């Protein structure tokens, strides 16, 4: 049988209640759980600051004579807060003490009694029996039982916010003494429990040695009154009105969801020595001034997950109309995004995570201006900074520490450091996420309130929200840039305009020369010379623009090669590991048939890798830029051979429908290869995703080659593409693959290559009758590329 020492309670409280605001959070939640009709009142009654008390006490301990006593009493009298009213009387005995020893004892007693924090509610209250059975039981399971029963019966709400039974340790965090005064409606008197937490500090005491018994107090203020009043004394912290005001402005303002209608939020009243301290509320004018926003929800529909996101861009720092985009991700998309081929997050977690809502507002702090109702530009900046962060709320109450100034739970700052363009760091957002205890039973707080417990549902939850902000919103901004900010230069038009201007300038100079007297011809010569210099400058500028565009195309091509190298390197590493395993298995064996089989496997895999490596030569700078004549059917024979081991490993059936006659084209072969390789890479990923969901699926890739014009249709039976995503998948950095494989460049580069060749790459309008998703790409090459 385990035994527990009394001091364990002190250690437990220190670990589980890690800050003052969490202590208040627990006490306020307990009051709300008691169904308090008038909310919660938190009253600070401070006659003497703790720092002043400690300073005076330290001087008293060092005093060598009674002559110092009058000085100490004078200092105490000066430091007492006049606004504390009658509470100052607790120090009368210290002020009247005749010796240093008495002064110290009376000072300690006065500080313990006069400095208090009171948390009061008008809820259900506790009976004498409940005080004994529940309040004096740390970790009582009574509320947990009721919550579990509520969830099991399918209720959309739970009866309590808290369930761990550790709220009373919050009082220990704030002060050494606690008085509980409580009563139920049918009680005739107040039930009182006094606790001195210092009793648990005895190193030799066991938990059963420390005993506190409730007792009956005086009559209730009214016969039907019920509620609880916690009075915490002998405070541990140095409290000032300024400190409380700061907590009210930042921490208390976030205890309940500030995005909700104030009338729907639990009432919390703060006061300092009888004066009310206002708790900030969110000014909706700030939200209306956001430069961009996103909002959405995650739902479970008929047992399947779905993510809906709407994004709006109002002002990205340049002239553009208000832009909006709506994205819906269904089960196949979410499985590809979160579960992936690695299976780090089980697909079941996408359902068990439960539904949640979210919204966020983005601000470019350089674009702030004065706003009526808020104030100057600096006032707006300060207000946005005060509310910055994406906060998490469960049933309307804060989940710590998400959204705190030092917390980066979505990894926004880490991603921002590695990106150019828009910097989406946590301080630029004002937002919230809403979960519920009933709807999200697996998203539970850690016992110490330092975030959610780590489990598959928590991992999926964070990744979903991270994808919304870091990928979808960022990609949306870049797409608006592409359409409104980064207008491409048409060199043909520019050259034509320059030639026209040169012609007009030359004609004008000729006419001027005829009109200017001979003695003034030097001025015309200077003008002519300036025109020549201008022509030279424009020629060099035009050449540089062409070089930059060429460099841009080359960068796109090199990025594509990089993706190919990554894939082939993976295959090479996998084949090498397979070779080592095969050789290791053969060690010490004399089985010719087994040796033959294993060597044949090794030979086949190495042959495939060799073929894939030879393909890379076609993608080199020289190979990629050189047009050559080749047969499309023969090209696919090479690609099929290069992927043979990979197809066999995944059980993929490759069907290539070739025309009766060769389809010979003159094109940059490397670019065509790159297009097909990118399509294959995507196809294999999404086939595997569907196969994970449907184990009996036979993976099939069908390639059809046609001529007139030369066309390649590429179809698979993988998860497919949602109809809503057809216009998005060719955007740079758009990807729904799992994080480790998410590049978002493959299809973008493939489309760029197709257009550079004079062709097109599109998604066919054909839909899978079972999934209603698109599974076919069509690459149409220019008819002029055909070689007879």
Image (tube, rainbow, N blue to C red):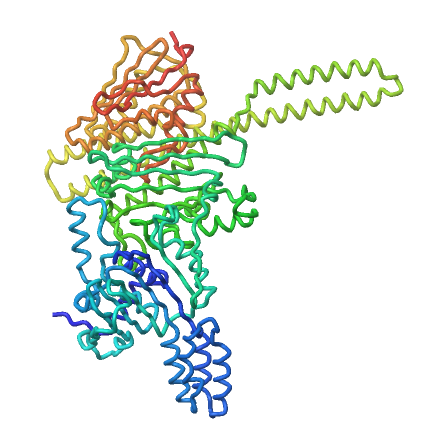
- Which residue corresponds to the image point at 42% horizontal and 74% vertical from the top-left? 50
Q: Quadrant of residue 29?
A: bottom left
Judged left or right of residue 449, residue 666 is right
694 and 278: which one is in front?
278
Task: Give the x, y percent position of residue 749.
Answer: 40, 27
Task: Give the x, y percent position of residue 170.
Answer: 30, 65
The quadrant of the rendering that contains the C terminus is top left
Task: Give the x, y percent position of residue 256.
Answer: 35, 52
Q: Quadrant of residue 107?
A: bottom left
Q: Is residue 327 above or below residue 664?
A: below
443 and 459: which one is in front?
443
- Which residue corresponds to the image point at 69% horizontal and 18% vertical from the top-left? 502
- Which residue corresponds to the image point at 42% horizontal and 10% vertical from the top-left? 784
Q: Quadrant of residue 584?
A: top left
Q: Is residue 557 above or below residue 72?
A: above
Judged left or right of residue 201, residue 262 is right
Residue farthest along the front direction in this orientation: 223
Q: Is residue 144 above or below residue 76?
A: above
Q: Is residue 196 above or below residue 164?
A: below
Task: Give the x, y percent position of residue 775.
Answer: 28, 23
- Which residue corresponds to the image point at 46% horizontal and 47% vertical from the top-left? 283
161 and 785: which one is in front?
161
């Amino acid at each position: 049988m385990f035994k527990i020492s009394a001091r364990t309670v002190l250690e437990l409280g220190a670990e589980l209640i890690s800050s003052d605001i969490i202590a208040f959070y627990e006490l306020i939640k307990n009051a709300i759980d008691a169904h308090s009709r008038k909310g919660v009142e938190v009253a600070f009654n401070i006659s003497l600051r703790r720092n002043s008390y400690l300073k005076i006490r330290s001087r008293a301990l060092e005093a060598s004579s009674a002559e110092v006593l009058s000085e100490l009493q004078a200092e105490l009298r000066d430091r007492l807060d006049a606004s504390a009213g009658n509470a100052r009387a607790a120090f009368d005995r210290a002020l009247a003490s005749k010796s240093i020893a008495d002064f110290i004892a009376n000072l300690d007693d006065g500080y313990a009694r006069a400095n208090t924090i009171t948390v009061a509610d008008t809820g259900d209250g506790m009976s004498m029996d409940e005080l004994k059975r529940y309040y004096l039981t740390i970790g009582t399971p009574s509320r947990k039982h009721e919550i579990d029963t509520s969830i099991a019966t399918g209720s959309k709400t739970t009866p309590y916010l808290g369930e761990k039974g550790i709220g009373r340790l919050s009082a220990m965090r704030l002060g050494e003494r606690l008085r509980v005064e409580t009563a139920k409606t049918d009680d005739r008197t107040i039930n009182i429990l006094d606790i001195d937490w210092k009793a648990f500090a005895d190193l030799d005491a066991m938990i059963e040695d420390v005993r506190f018994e409730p007792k009956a107090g005086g009559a209730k203020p009214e016969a039907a009154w019920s509620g609880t009043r916690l009075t915490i004394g002998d405070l541990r912290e140095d409290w000032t009105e300024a400190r409380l005001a700061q907590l009210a402005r930042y921490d208390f303002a976030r205890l309940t969801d500030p995005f909700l209608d104030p009338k729907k939020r639990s009432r919390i009243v703060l006061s300092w020595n009888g004066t009310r301290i206002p708790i900030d509320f969110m000014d909706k004018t700030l939200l209306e001034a956001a430069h961009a926003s996103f909002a959405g929800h995650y739902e479970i529909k008929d047992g399947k997950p779905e993510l809906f996101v709407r994004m709006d861009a109002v002002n990205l720092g340049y002239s553009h109309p208000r832009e909006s985009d709506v994205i819906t991700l269904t089960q196949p998309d979410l499985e590809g995004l979160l579960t992936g081929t690695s299976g780090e997050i089980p697909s079941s977690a996408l359902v068990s995570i439960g539904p949640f809502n979210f919204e966020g507002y983005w601000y470019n702090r350089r674009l702030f201006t004065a706003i009526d109702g808020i104030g100057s530009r600096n006032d707006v900046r300060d207000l946005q900074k005060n509310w910055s962060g994406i906060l998490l709320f469960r049933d309307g109450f804060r989940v710590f520490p998400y959204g705190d100034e030092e917390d980066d739970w979505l990894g926004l700052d880490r991603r921002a450091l590695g990106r150019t363009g828009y910097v989406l760091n946590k301080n630029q957002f004002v937002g919230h996420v809403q979960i519920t205890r009933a709807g999200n039973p697996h998203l539970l707080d850690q016992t110490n309130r330092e975030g959610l417990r780590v489990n598959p549902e928590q991992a999926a939850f964070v990744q979903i929200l991270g994808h919304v902000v870091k990928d979808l919103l960022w990609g949306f901004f870049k797409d608006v840039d592409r359409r409104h900010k980064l207008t491409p230069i048409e060199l043909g038009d520019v050259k034509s305009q320059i030639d026209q201007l040169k012609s007009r300038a030359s004609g004008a100079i000729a006419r001027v020369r005829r009109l200017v007297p001979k003695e003034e011809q030097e001025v015309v010569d200077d003008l002519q010379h300036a025109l020549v210099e201008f022509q030279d400058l424009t020629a060099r500028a035009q050449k540089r623009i062409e070089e930059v565009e060429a460099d841009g195309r080359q960068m796109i091509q090199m990025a594509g090669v990089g993706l190919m190298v990554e894939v082939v390197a993976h295959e090479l590493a996998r084949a090498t590991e397979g070779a080592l395993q095969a050789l290791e298995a053969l060690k010490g064996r004399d089985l010719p048939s087994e040796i033959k089989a294993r060597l044949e496997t090794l030979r086949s895999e190495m042959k495939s890798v060799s073929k894939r490596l030879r393909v890379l030569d076609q993608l080199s700078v020289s190979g990629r830029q050189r047009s050559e004549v080749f047969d499309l059917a023969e090209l696919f024979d090479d690609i099929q051979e290069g992927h043979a081991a990979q197809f066999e490993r995944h059980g993929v059936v490759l069907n290539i429908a070739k025309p009766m006659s060769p389809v010979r084209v003159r094109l940059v072969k490397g670019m065509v290869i790159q297009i097909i390789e990118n399509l294959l890479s995507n196809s294999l990923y999404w086939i595997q995703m569907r196969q994970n969901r449907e184990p009996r699926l036979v993976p099939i890739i069908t390639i059809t080659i046609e001529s007139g014009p030369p066309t390649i249709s590429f179809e698979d039976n993988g998860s497919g593409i949602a109809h809503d995503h057809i216009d998005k998948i060719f955007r740079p950095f758009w990807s729904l693959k799992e994080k480790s494989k998410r590049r978002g460049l493959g299809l973008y580069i493939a489309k760029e290559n197709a257009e550079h060749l004079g062709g097109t790459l599109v998604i066919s309008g054909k839909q899978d009758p079972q999934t209603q998703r698109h599974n076919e790409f069509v690459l149409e090459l220019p008819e002029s590329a055909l070689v007879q």
